[in-house]
Amino acid sequence: MTILSRLNTLLHPAQVTHGRMAVALIAALAADGLQIFLQAIPLAPQVIDVVASVVVIIVIGFHLLLLPTFIIELVPLVDDLPTWTVCVVAVIALRRREARVGSADSSSGSTTASSPPVPPS
């Protein structure tokens, strides 16, 4: 197991609920919106990026997609794009897919284990 995957499993929340998803989306939208208005203040966009990344990691957990998003936000003019919002939507979609696949695997495993044996013909 690599260090990055270990870090990803360490900071992965137990369950991403609708409330957590809403808080993460609000934080991302607020970060993207505030950066446009506070662009003229020195270091304000960087502080907003740090706060946004911390809030998102606390709410929906760490994901490797957050690292390039944080780095992209340091590039002038590109930081005006809604990168936090897009990243949070992508992470939420991936987390929901992981949960759906995980529940499908556990349910399919339990049905085969509890089904009666088929008698030989």
Image (spheres, grey):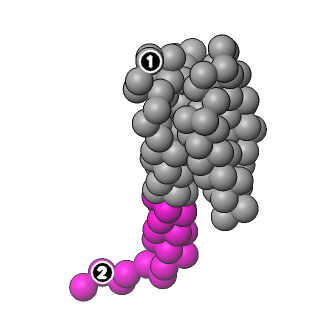
Where are the magenta residues, as a range? Answer: 100-121
Q: Is residue 63 left or right of residue 47?
A: left
Q: Is residue 35 above or below residue 68?
A: below
Q: Earlier in the sequence, mark 1 or mark 2?
A: 1
Residue 10 appears in which quarter of the rendering?
top right
**Where residue 49 appears, x then y in whole percent?**
63, 27
- Asked whether residue 24 is drawn in magenta, I would say no
Residue 61 appears in which quarter of the rendering?
top right
Q: Residue at x 57, y 15 (%)?
A: 3
Q: Is residue 6 left or right of residue 81?
A: right
Q: Is residue 68 visible?
A: no
Tell me the residue that label 1 is attached to.
Answer: 76
Whole-angstrom CA distance, mark 1 to mark 2, is 70 Å
Tell me the residue that label 2 is attached to.
Answer: 120
In this view, the residue in front, 54 or 1, is 54
Q: Choose mark 1 or mark 2, whichever is in front.
A: 1
In this view, the residue in front, 50 or 95, is 50
- Under circle 1, the secondary element is loop
Q: In this view, does 89 lie to the left or right of 39?
A: left
Quadrant in which the C terminus appears: bottom left
Q: Residue at x 44, y 18 (%)?
A: 76
Q: Which residue is drawn at 72% across and 45% down?
A: 59
Q: What residue type is labelled 1?
A: Pro
